[in-house]
Image (cartoon, rainbow, N blue to C red):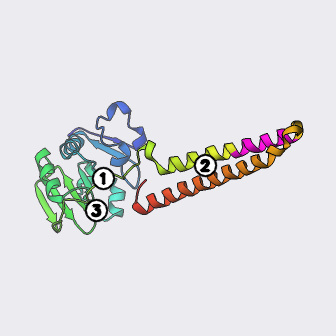
Amino acid sequence: MPTTTYAHFRDVPESAWRWPSFSPAEIACRGTAAIKINTEAMDKLQALRNRLGKPLIVRSAYRSPSHNRAVGGAPASKHMLGTAFDIAMSNHDPVTFAEAARAVGFLGFGTYPRSGFMHIDLGPARSWGEPFAPRATPFVPEVPPAREVLADSRTLKGGGAAGIATVGAAGVEVAQDVLAETQSAILPLVPYLDTLRWVFIAVALIGIAVAIHARIDDWKRGQR
């Protein structure tokens, strides 16, 4: 089994890393940041990821001997060889996951339902741990957040109305000042402009209120 060890995962050359679904940081020791790359194990892990078609959340991969002792790992843990992975079951059905892992060549299986992960390694063939409880659904269904079409967005409409009205109010105020100073003959129009300015201000406030209400309503619905 070709194995390469680096003192820190940042030392791994990009040219030496051929597993696109994972990063050296995910595989490195959580205690020391050192990494031992077993290419056969990593190839099988990538094959498992491809077979399942969804992310694998790696809880633990390589462990240095000191870190393995610190976390209470088995004295001859496969983690120290870089041939074992603990994978979270939060986004996987344990039964389907185990079947797929066996299909790509993993032989050792440890189940830890209380901690929510499954241990897989290259062998020898064996298994231990409590079984995961049956689930009503394989895993929590993914519900994409509802998104408003931009043209129909209440927030956009409210904010746009507020912006236009604010500009309009400012323009009216400028016109008032100009007329008051230079056009004394049409001073009677100034009060009407003042009324128009207040109309714009009212529209701006309504627009702001619409935008705030839309965001609060979206938040209550769990929208983003």
Question: Left or right: 166 with respect to 19?
Answer: right
Q: Which mark is residue 162?
A: 2
Question: Where in the figure is residue 220, as x and y percent of width and height?
Answer: 43, 63
Q: Which residue is mark 3?
A: 73
Residue plotted at (36% across, 43% down): 24
Query: The disc labelled 2 sits on which kind of residue?
Result: Ala
Of all residues shown, which one is farthest toward the top? Answer: 15
Real-space Cα distance between discs 1 and 2?
A: 45 Å
Q: In the figure, 117 relative to 6: above or below?
A: below
Q: Secondary structure at mark 2?
A: helix
The answer for how far apart the CA atoms under marks 3 and 2 are is 62 Å
Residue bounds of the magenta highlight: 169-180
Residue 57 image label? 1
Q: Is residue 71 left or right of residue 92?
A: right
The amino acid pointed to by label 3 is Gly
Decide which of tag 1 and tag 2 comes sooner along the chain: 1
Q: CA distance from mark 3 to mark 1?
A: 20 Å
Please state the horizontal and vertical placement of residue 189, each as a whole percent of the image: 79, 44
